[in-house]
Amino acid sequence: DAGVIQSPRHEVTEMGQEVTLRCKPISGHDYLFWYRQTMMRGLELLIYFNNNVPIDDSGMPEDRFSAKMPNASFSTLKIQPSEPRDSAVYFCASSPDRGSGANVLTFGAGSRLTVL
Amino acid sequence: DQQVKQNSPSLSVQEGRISILNCDYTNSMFDYFLWYKKYPAEGPTFLISISSIKDKNEDGRFTVFLNKSAKHLSLHIVPSQPGDSAVYFCAASAAGRRALTFGSGTRLQVQP
């Protein structure tokens, strides 16, 4: 398996523009997570899905952020409009529903977002 | 409210010696603990974990110790190697909740 695939790896945009980050989880994994890493707040959970259904979105900063999972192999995190304080590395992760690795999240390489 | 705390932002050790990374938690509902390693420009990678029913788990050079009464866990790396130089994150999850809560990380540098 190629692991968790995120795109783009780097995104530079201007304030006010829409940003869409994409994630392909590991095939067969039922859980998908979006995390954000910043210097100030470290690695923080934004939202997670189980079987394509959002379970906990309490970490989504505000209404400018939205996440979807239209099917088991694809998720998007959208920021509209983007602001400079959204600059961060956004990680997607997935995990299986059961088995020895059920509590272990596998992370993608991240998408580094810079909002000017 | 930081539920998982790594109070040492950095640690430097000599190659061949032991590295000890520490982590404290406040949420008594946490029942599963993990350590992740992160290299620059990569995502965190899973290293080792421990369930709250155990107090020690060992995997090669890596050992995690859990002290539930003190709400403290530690990661021991013996012997340390230059390739171990990375940022180490402690993480925890509560029963019935799959998401992990992460500490702020400790940057380990192993000097040759």
Image: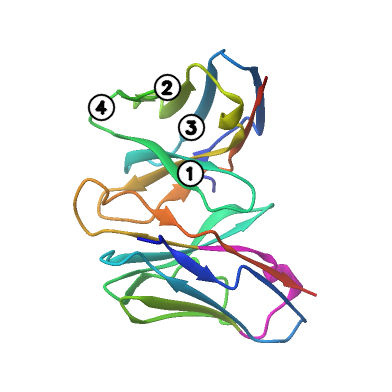
Callout 4 and callout 1 share a chain: yes
Q: Which residue is mark 3?
A: B24
Classify residue B56 by image quadrant. Answer: top left
Q: Which residue is mark 1?
A: B3
Callout 4 and callout 3 share a chain: yes
Is the Cβ of the residue at disc 2 closer than 8 Å to that at disc 3?
Answer: no
Expressed as whole percent of the image width and height from the top left, the position of residue A106 reads 40, 54
Which structural element holds mark 3?
strand
Which structural element holds mark 2?
loop
In the visual, does B99 lie left or right of B85? left
In the visual, does A56 lie left or right of A16? left
Is the Cβ of the residue at disc 2 closer than 8 Å to that at disc 4?
Answer: no
Foreground of the two, B107 or A81: B107
Upstream in sequence: badge 2 or badge 4: 4
In the visual, does A99 lie left or right of A41? left
Per the model, the C-alpha gap separating discs 2 and 3 is 22 Å
Classify residue B12 by image quadrant. Answer: top right
Is the Cβ of the residue at disc 3 closer than 8 Å to that at disc 1?
Answer: no
Is the Cβ of the residue at disc 4 closer than 8 Å to that at disc 1?
Answer: no
Q: Residue furthest right?
A: A116
Q: Residue furthest front?
A: A1
Expressed as whole percent of the image width and height from the top left, the position of residue A20 reads 57, 81
